[in-house]
Image (tube, helix red, strand yellow):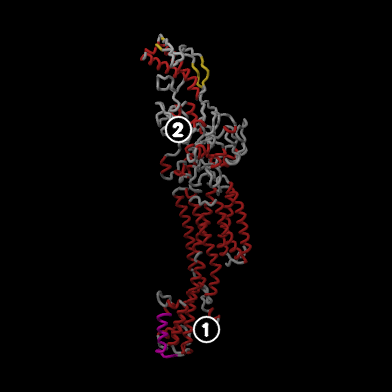
Amino acid sequence: MRIDESQRNWAVAAILIFVVALVVYLPYAAHSAHGPSGASPLGLAFGIVGFSFMIFAGLLGARKKVPVWRVGRAQAWMRGHLWLGLLSLPLIFFHGGFRFGGPLTAALMVLLIIVVASGLFGAALQHFVPNTMTSEVPLETIFEQIEHVRGQLLDEADDFVAGVTAPNGPLAVAAAARAAAVATEELPIVSEESVAPLNLFYEREMRPFLRHERGKGESLLDRAKSRVMFTALRTLLPLEVHDTVKDLEEICEEERQLRRQSKLHHVLHDWLLIHVPLSLALLLLGAVHAVMALRY
Amino acid sequence: MPRSQRTTKSVAKRIDLNYFKRPHPLRRLRFILSIAALALAVVWLAGFGLARNSFVYTAGKVSPAHAVVSRKCFACHIERAGKFRETAIDRGCLSCHDGPIHHANQIFTPKCGSCHVEHRGQIRLAAAATESCTQCHADLETAGTPTTFYRHITGFGAGHPEFAVLRSGEPDPGTIKLNHFVHLKAGLKGPHGEPVQLDCEDCHRANQANQQWAYAIGPDAPPGETPKLPAAVTASLSPYRIKPPTMVGARAYMGPILYARQCAACHPLQFDKRFTESVPHDTPEIVHAYLVKKFSDYIAAHPAELREPISTVALPAKPVPVSPRVYSPPEQWVNAKVADAEALLWGKTCKQCHTMLAAQAAPAAQPSLPALPKVAESKITARWFPHAMFDHNQHRLVTCESCHVRARTSQNTADVLVPSVHVCAECHHTGSAGAESRCFECHIYHDWRNEKEVTSRFPLADIVGGAKRPGDEENSSGGAK
């Protein structure tokens, strides 16, 4: 979700709540006999409001599980998650008077800081990375399909290379065995000797690159190097197979983009591996703290 | 078909439409981590629960005074069956500490925890907030007779009155005649006639100061030895005379002025040219007995002096004929000499410092005694603030005259040289550069004169050992006794 004009209302509301909380907290902290405390009426109020915001932020996950429920738009929930979740941090600090307290409260404070910090990091990523994705990965596909598409790219490349080599060659045989995907008769058949450089390049560089073989074909990861390699390859091949070389170059480009998409996807979502589990632990321990603090 | 000629349809065909049926690795990992985080949290809490250790729920570190029971929550949070709230109650505190009330006529007794707030880390629990005191003293109301104390104090810097001893304008009740101005003048004659410059600490030192006194003399005050003090002075210096939170330091108050320690070297009590020693610095009866013995012994050793030449005006050019006076019996000589010595002592030497009361008739039990004067009680005030503590030792940083500003110029015994409250406020004020200015710095809430013994309830093993709860058996029947 981008931090743009659509967030204005939530941002203004969050800032207002923060300012009100600050205006209440400062005189309270300055004039309370023993300093601010979570056990004082005002401290307790800060704690209740802060924890309520945390619960609301946590409910976003539940809201996503039931997208058809008429409980507000998912975008509104997301904005609430972002701003109220962020507000929970100062409110909980006001609750505890900026002290970490005992083991449970200290753990809660640390968890809250990590959760909010990871959330802010995630929000920043969600703001900037999609633009990068759009510009750098025009051939973006569904993330879950990436491995599947890669397999298809490999098959496609195998078929292209088999198509320009001898009909009895190993690639051509492999291609014939597959179900009629490629009409080899449409491709020009050139001598095996003249396409030997293509075979060599494909077997040594491109195929390992497409198969993700460690330490092989890594030159093709770099777009500039790749371009140079394909230009050189064209000079070694007859004109009839240049279209095939172009197709192979496009496959390499698509593979590079898929790899980039995969990386950006991890950048966009890996922080959730910290944010979500720790949020759940925070809510659980927060509930325990609320009960035990009232009890003791 | 060349790759560049592919259509959207052909590209769409590459999509595996059943992909959503397979678990997404990232989502699966997130789910596993979420379960693990929750499990870890539960196991963490369960670990404490199984060990019956509630320490994990503590609101913060306890004060150093309670550090030994920091993991024994039950020591203060006395459980009560059927009660949900288990905040630390006064009963928990009072089972180990007595907390005598402040005043018999107070109208409100705060809970222990409202002044001594625990779980705030490394703090002094006795260091109560000013608000703890001003909740009453800002507008003091008392039960029964109206209070004579100041009724509207909201802090040391806000409404604290001038010290009572200065406010009243009463003179120093002491009867010893001392002129500070004269004693601090330059060029005073010292014990051997040499010029000396006295300083404050030549006479005023903290109680039990273990140093040589510059002007001490005589066997009754050897260096470092605390002389025997009158019972009234000892009582006034007792740390328990007021209500201390802790023992007042042994060097908190100035030691009493003693003739032998501070005065004797310069002010010898000589009584006759025949003797170099002084009379004892004691009551007139003892001095009289001393003189009688001294002269009796002397005349026994020097019987020739019973014939004493009587000279009138001695003119060098024209000697006057001498007709000796003969004392018989020798007691006559002794009585005459004792009378001369006492006239010197009572009329000049003692009177220089003491207030001498008129001679009274000899007591009936000892008719042989002559009429002796009385020495007025010295009434030196050892402690000027009966409702507050002050520790000179803690204030060594500053010179005496910084606070006792009139000491060098005072010429009258009646001058009260106690510093004003404004002098204290120069250092003791709020703000980062101020010394402690909360009430507890000088005043005590609990009246420890009424302290009662408390019965210990924890065996040592329960405090330093395992987490056995000594109150377990009692909890079901209503809590610790």
Provide residue B195's location: percent of width, then percent of height.
45, 32
- Circles 2 and 1 in contact, beta carbons < 8 Å: no
Q: Which residue is mark 1?
A: B4
Instruction: Please rate how many residues cluster around mark 2, counting C-alpha atoms within 10 Å: few if below 14, some from 14 to 19, many from 20.
Output: some
Instruction: Please rate how many residues cluster around mark 1, counting C-alpha atoms within 10 Å: few if below 14, some from 14 to 19, many from 20.
Output: few
Q: Quadrant of residue B287?
A: top left
Would residue B249 be seen by someone viewing this image from the given angle?
yes
Residue nearest the observer in this picture, B463 or B293: B293
Q: How many marks?
A: 2
Residue A194 magenta-highlighted: yes
Q: Please, which residue is most extreme toward the front here?
A: B317
Q: Which residues are magenta?
A: A189-206
B164 w.r.t. A239: above or below: above
Chain at tag 2 = B
* Label 2, label 1: how far apart the Cα atoms are: 115 Å
Q: Which residue is mark 2?
A: B196
Looking at the rendered structure, the secondary structure element under dot 2 is: strand
> Which amino acid type corresponds to the residue marked 1 in the rendered image?
Ser
Q: Residue drawn 55% across and 71% down? A: A131
Give the mark nearer the N terminus: 2 vs 1. Answer: 1
Provide residue A196's location: percent of width, then percent of height.
40, 87
> Which amino acid type corresponds to the residue marked 2 in the rendered image?
Val
**Same chain for marks 2 and 1?**
yes
Residue B256 magenta-highlighted: no
Provide residue B56's location: percent of width, then percent of height.
48, 50
Looking at the rendered structure, the secondary structure element under dot 1 is: helix
For the N terminus of chain A, give its image quadrant.
Answer: bottom right
